[in-house]
Image (cartoon, coloured by chain):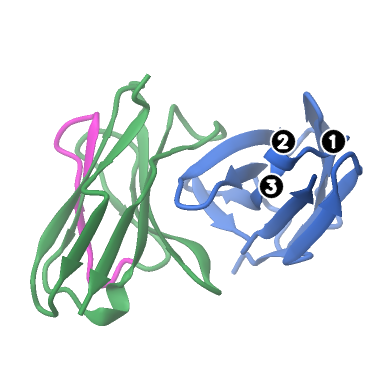
Amino acid sequence: KQEVTQIPAALSVPEGENLVLNCSFTDSAIYNLQWFRQDPGKGLTSLLLIQSSQREQTSGRLNASLDKSSGRSTLYIAASQPGDSATYLCAVETSGSRLTFGEGTQLTVNP
Amino acid sequence: NAGVTQTPKFRVLKTGQSMTLLCAQDMNHEYMYWYRQDPGMGLRLIHYSVGEGTTAKGEVPDGYNVSRLKKQNFLLGLESAAPSQTSVYFCASSYEINQPQHFGDGTRLSIL
């Protein structure tokens, strides 16, 4: 059974700091890994999707890497802003278009 | 740009009552999903559909039924609600496999 773990569970940083969120998964037979953002009381917003054959994806200040063989991914956020405060979730897609989620990292960026 | 719309947004039920949650998407997506989100458990897949007229079980399907009579709609039913089904329910859709999933804002369901 696929299991996804995210470390740390919570993170508080001052504005402007670069930061890294970690995600690990137990079964490397994945189609892709996805990073989402969830604001309080809201649904999930897709940030980045890395195909199993790719090593990284970038969108603005976000960069996500994937090491499928070791079962790890990182989300790098450059020059963090208070508006980046949210819960960040990673998920892996396996057969049958099924997503398995981690429990998330709650990020607070302090002005 | 409506995207994925869930109704209702909030609901309180008594044990044993039934209800249906509606999910509608306007992106012509083939795949649709129902998840529940609980503290300490993360998001878990309940049921999903790979096209109109199809449904399949996810990780936690017991106590729920689904239907996909129209491509744009995916209904989640609780026939006899139980307190263990108190949760936040999210619907999502995607164009096909290996594509980003788009989520609705959720339905907060409390069962007393």
On what subunit does the disc labeled 3 rest? Answer: A
Q: Which three-letter amino acid code belongs to the residue tagged 1?
A: Arg
Main SS of the magenta part reads loop
Find out whether the residues at labels 2 and 3 contact each other: C-beta distance under 8 Å.
Answer: no
Q: Colour of chain A?
A: blue
Residue kind at label 3, given as amino acid type: Ser
Mark 1 is surrounded, within 10 Å at the Cα level, by few (under 14), some (14 to 19) or many (20 or more) other residues, namely few
Q: Quadrant of the C terminus of chain A?
A: top right
Q: A54 or A4, which lies in front?
A: A4
How far across and down, in percent of the image, does residue B100 sit?
55, 33
**From this viewpoint, is residue B87 visible?**
yes
State if disc 1 and disc 2 touch (CB < 8 Å): yes
Q: CA distance from mark 1 to mark 3?
A: 26 Å
Left/right of residue A54 with respect to residue A2 in the rendered view? right
Question: For the residues tagged 2 and 1, is the chain the same?
Answer: yes
Q: Magenta residues, as a range?
A: B61-74
**Residue where numbered disc 1 is placed:** A55
**Residue A25 placement, left or right of B56:** right
Q: Left or right of A106: which side holds A40?
A: left
